[in-house]
Amino acid sequence: MDLWTSPTPNGWKVTILIEELREAGHALSHLAIHTVDLAQGEHKTEAFTARNPNQKIPVLQDGKRFIMESCAILQYLAEQFPTSLLPMDGDRWEVLPWLYWQAANVGPAFGNKLSYTRYMDDVPEPAKAHPLERFGRESLRLVSVIDHQLRSQPFLCGSQFTIADIALFPWIRGYKWSKVDITAWPRVMEWVARVRARPGVGRGLGYGVPQDEVDRWGPDRKEAYARGGQTITSPLGQKPVPKGRP
Ligand SMILES: N[C@@H](CCC(=O)N[C@@H](CS)C(=O)NCC(=O)O)C(=O)O
């Protein structure tokens, strides 16, 4: 198996799962991880596009099969290597809707809030006001949904830590970077600490980042992420996938 990824929220989902599977006893020794340099546009190359026509990380190759979309990769790996991270009986339906919920709601809302907060330097400030308000409000509404889930259970789907928590965690733990103030929801803050305390999560977050910057980026890294994000979100980077690809 091969994984192409980068140290970003959608990338960390998969490296966290890999380390959680290792914690659970799956060696995954046949899995190779390749770093994609997004700021250099490596995900727009022909070779990468052949793996993922959507030109985004992460993407997994298993034999002749390519799997795009971080949450689909979480489900695929969790099914290949069964653990309590995804129940294989009827209880899987306690988990899968929340996995889809993350992909369809939290990723886009937090991703857009982050982009307008940190990256879109070529958008005039007045034009940012509406998307900042819209995606900021929606992100906070989604945090209130998480809080509601956690009112009587330690994890998103119940007493067990699952791939739904994994999908959610990198976005929520980055609340300072996206400036979505989750501190008014102590249960959500406690969940962030609970998930972060897991050794597999710590190792998964350490992928592509020096140990001393896993939880707090230094000024150079902040600058590099802001610059890289700006390169990606700039209209100049938004070219359609070429027609007539083989
Ligand atoms: N829905 C996709 C989103 C993937 C995504 O947006 N990946 C980002 C990094 S977190 C990326 O590759 N960005 C490069 C670009 O948009 O040009 C998933 O969950 O896999």
Image (cartoon, grey):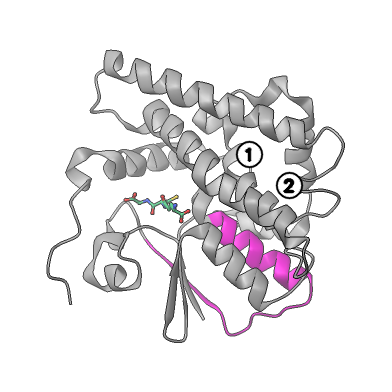
- Pinpoint residue 114: horizontal percent, then vertical percent: 45, 33
Q: Secondary structure at mark 1?
A: helix
Residue 192 lies, with reference to residue 82, above or below; the image says: above
- The residue at 46%/26% (across/down) is 135
Three-letter residue code for mark 2: Arg
Quarter occupied by residue 220:
top left
Question: Where is the C terminus found, in terms of image quarters?
Answer: bottom left
Residue occupying image coordinates x 51% and y 57% = 11
Residue 196 got which mark? 2
Residue 49 location, x and y as percent? 28, 67
Q: Which amino acid, by three-letter code, is at mark 1?
A: Arg
Q: Is residue 212 visible?
A: no
| Sequence-wise first label, 1 or 2 | 1
Q: CA distance from mark 1 to mark 2?
A: 9 Å
Q: Is residue 70 visible?
A: yes
Residue 83 relative to residue 79: left or right: right
Depicted 86 relative to depicted 39: above or below: below
User: Which residue is painted at 79% across and 65% down in the image?
Assistant: 84
Cβ at disc 1 under 8 Å from ligand 1: no
Is residue 91 part of the magenta span, yes or no? Answer: no
The disc at residue 173 is 1
Outermost residue, left side: 244
Task: Point out the stretch of residues depicted in magenta.
Answer: 12-36
Res 180 → quadrant: top right
Quadrant for residue 217, please give it. Answer: top right
Left or right of 125, for residue 62: right
Question: Quick check: 158 above or below 79?
Answer: above
